[in-house]
Amino acid sequence: MAEIVIVPDAAAAGILVADEIAALIRRTPTAVLGLATGSTPLPVYEALPSRLADVDVSQVRGFALDEYVGIDPAHPESYRSVIAREVVEPLGLDPARIRVPDGSLEGIEHAGDDYEAAIEAAGGVDLQILGIGTDGHIGFNEPGSSFASQTRVKTLTAQTRQDNARFFDSIDDVPMHCITQGLGTILQARHLVLLAFGEGKAAAVASAVEGPVTASLPGSAIQLHPHVTVVVDEAAASRL
Ligand code: GLP
């Protein structure tokens, strides 16, 4: 059973999770962080610089969950750019120690295996930050994804392209494909921290935490993990 923490708002969640991450890095300066994108983890990234002010982060490693396929890496909404802008630069992390799946078309057939090998070589992820999509996806593992899946290329659903269109000029600019850590990859992280805010996430949160464990709701995979913390506001917790 996951530990559920209900907080007053997203800012409070950000502080709570940032404190947890800072404690981890103090204990383990070589900590490996699993980084998520989307709007949900932003309060964590905003709270981290003050929490890490007196902490040596030079050896911290990080692995992003996912990336769009075929997007220009320099595009401001590529996850490479987002992780650089929201995490690496403000925290002063070593960019060489932070990886994002390679969504470029050249070599895409090896990109998943290469990424898995890099995570393994780093000793696995210590703390994985997760958001959840309105359809229950985590990373970009859309409904139907195998719980054993590894990092691979997937097709984005119409719903997710619609949800993410706000980051682009128009929905036509949202890529059709992505490369994402699999549910199996995510489940190997030692601690999962899933965050969700707002009414729109309430159904997905309830299904992930309390519903049947099913590939139709990828977030329900968290029920298979022994160490999960779910941090939600009242609205996202309203159907629990
Ligand atoms: C995106 C990301 C996920 C994220 C989810 C929710 O498509 N690939 O990692 O958790 O959808 O996004 P948001 O946090 O913006 O609601």
Image: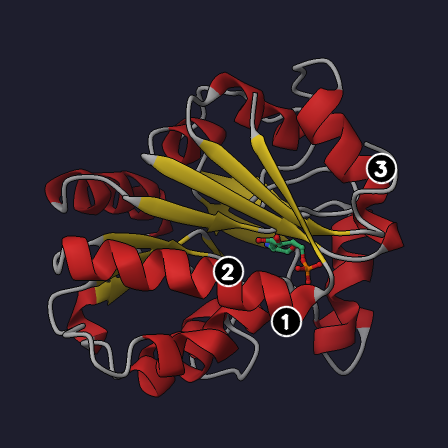
**Residue at mark 1:** 11
Q: What is the three-letter code of the residue carrying label 3?
A: Ala
Against 210, residue 199 (above or below) is below
Q: Identify the residue at horizontal 65%, vertical 15% (top origin).
A: 213
Quarter of the image for residue 24 reads bottom left
Q: Identify the residue at horizontal 14%, vertical 74% (top origin).
A: 56
Q: Position of residue 165 (x, y in %)?
A: 77, 69
In this rendered view, identify the residue nearer to me: 79 or 239: 239
Mark closest to the chain's N terminus, 3 or 1 = 1
**Front: mark 2 or 3:** 2
Judged left or right of residue 240, residue 9 is left
Which of the labelled discs sits on residue 16, or is there none?
A: 2
Residue 106 appearing in the image: no
**Residue at mark 3:** 203
Badge 1: residue crowd in 10 Å (few <14, some 14–19, many ≥20): some
Q: Position of residue 71 (x, y in %)?
A: 52, 70
Judged left or right of residue 75, residue 204 is right
Judged left or right of residue 114, residue 87 is right
Q: Position of residue 44 (x, y in %)?
A: 51, 68
Badge 2: residue crowd in 10 Å (few <14, some 14–19, many ≥20): some
Mark closest to the chain's N terminus, 2 or 3 = 2
